[in-house]
Amino acid sequence: MADFKGRKTPGQQAAGPGGFWRIVLIILAAWLAMNLLTGGRNEPLIDYTMFLNQVERGNVESVTLEGREVTGVFKEPVQIGDAPANGAKPAKNERFTTHVPDFGDDDLLSTLREQGVSVKTLPARDRGWFWYLVISFLPLLLIGGLIYMQYRRMQGGGGGGMFNIGKSKARRAEPEKQKTTFDDVAGAKGPKKELEEIINFLKDPSAVRKLGGEVPRGMLLVGPPGTGKTLLARAVAGEAGVPFYHISGSDFMEMFVGVGASRVRDLFKEAKKNAPSIVFIDELDSIGRRRGAGLGGGHDEREQTLNQLLSELDGFEPNEDVIVMSATNRPDILDPALLRPGRFDRRVSVPMPSVDEREEILDIYVRNKPLADDVDLRRLASSTPGFSGADLENILNEAALLAARAEREEIANKDIENARDKVMMGLQRHGLTMTEEEKRIVAFHEAGHAMTAALLPRADPLHKVSVIPRAQSMGVTQQFPERDRYIYRKEYMLDRLAVMMGGRASEMLVFGTATSGAGNDLQQAFKLARRMVLSWGMSEKFAHMAMGGPEGQVFLGEEIASRREYSDQTATEVDLEVKSLLDEAYQRARECIEDHREELDKIVEELLDQEEIPGKRVLDILGVEKQPPKEAERQDA
């Protein structure tokens, strides 16, 4: 394959100069050991009884007695051992060796003399010195081998060996090997503009200093996972053409005390030697968490490593021409000393890509993928709101796997659709067996969602309805916005609540009872209604109040439980407001379904027959064309 062109396979590597001589030494050592143990003889060994029988038959020409070892020559070759299993002709031997029993054989010499055998005697060889050396030095060799293996293992771990454990584990990328540039980073126009200042400074530091300015020493890339923070850092190094040291925050930590601080010192010492240079620390939050936030003391290894990092960034000694870049998706837990001016004093936000940026990202990822004519990347970008660049790459990779499984030479649109559903909702549950009643409940539930989404004016456009069971659901109604939204009107939120309630309303209308299938819908609707009341002031009683407080994970040592900044009476009124919003949403959804009861049955029939129908087909059944009012469209804009 092209990706492995020029690489050596394990067999090729073993056949290199070092591997060749290693094999030769092993063969020589085995040959010497064999000669020491056998005395250099290769005569086949026979039983003593067989030897006596051949002597009595007169088939032995001569023998050599060497202690209790007897070697000799047959007059006629004799078969020694069993015949080959493959039926081949058995091999015969002229020479042999055997051993006289320890208790001796007083009649052996007389028998040999009677048969006319030529006898030669030699003194017995003393092999005791060899076994003495083996017993004496073998334990030492084993211990030495274990020590050497442990030493090589620690060297292979990237720490430079047991005696260099305090050395930095950062990997240096040379400027000529940095092929990633801003052309390889789709979208992210804002972050790239911010990072261009760093590139200009690294190329010509005097242009900034002659104006009395200083370039930020630390750049913190902040954004959700998969948005390309590490890719941006590599692109900066490729554009600037300077040495680039990259390391993960966890690489500083070790089981030995003081190793992390030592590695920080060694990293910056190396970077200063090759200044101007870039140091990139990925996952900064693994060592940069707020000090004193836990229940333990402040002398653990992580905090000592953080203290050393703070000193290197802006301590007593100047740190010129070394720019530190870091990436994290949890800036809220970083120590304030890291974020002050002089250290990581510039924060570059890397948000989720917009629809145009998603299309640019897809254009990059499909460069080496053959696409069918029905693939529309713009439509795919529009139908993946909230997806990061890594998510989009995953979708295209899954689509390529599906196309290969179907033995197609091009990636078709249905492959991309199936891949997107697989990424968003999980694998299909092929082994699931449902009764006819359960299938009808699921179909009416999803049809209720689809009808409310198609009929309400400000709901997101309906993409498709499916009753195919997947890992996370028994069915799904997909809606995708026509454009990215950043501000949401109250009317849009109310329609969204009604769509969430559409499944429960359809169940109650048709079957007259509630089912567990609406559990996730009710949870999501409750969370949305509560945020409307507490955080956005979208209620009658709390129209201009935001009481939601900070949202997110509560960390031990800062807050054991989230604080509530309103009274119990207000909490009761909040619950009533939330219930009022949910009741209103349910009633709107039920009215939509009651007014189109016959159309609901038609949608369910097609779902049970085809398992999946597009949103356009639902609109055709309802006889409506989803077109938001121009007034609302103008106000939303």
Image (tube, rainbow, N blue to C red):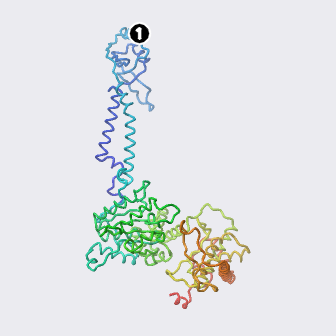
The one of 134 and 502 positioned closer to us in this rendering: 134
The one of 535 and 209 positioned closer to us in this rendering: 209
Residue shown at the point (39%, 11%) measured from the top left: 108
Q: Is residue 596 visible?
A: no
Residue, disc 1? 107
Q: Position of residue 267 (x, y in %)?
A: 34, 61
What's the residue type where badge 1 is placed?
Asp
Q: How many discs mark residues in the rendered view?
A: 1
Q: Secondary structure under badge 1?
A: loop
The one of 128 and 455 positioned closer to us in this rendering: 128
Quadrant for residue 472, please give it.
bottom right
Quadrant for residue 614, please give it.
bottom right
**Left or right relative to 196: residue 225:** right
Q: Is residue 393 visible?
A: yes
The one of 14 and 192 positioned closer to us in this rendering: 192
Q: Eyeballing the image, is 52 above or below 591?
A: above
Q: Position of residue 567 (x, y in %)?
A: 64, 78
Q: Position of residue 283 (x, y in %)?
A: 43, 65
Q: Position of residue 372 (x, y in %)?
A: 45, 71
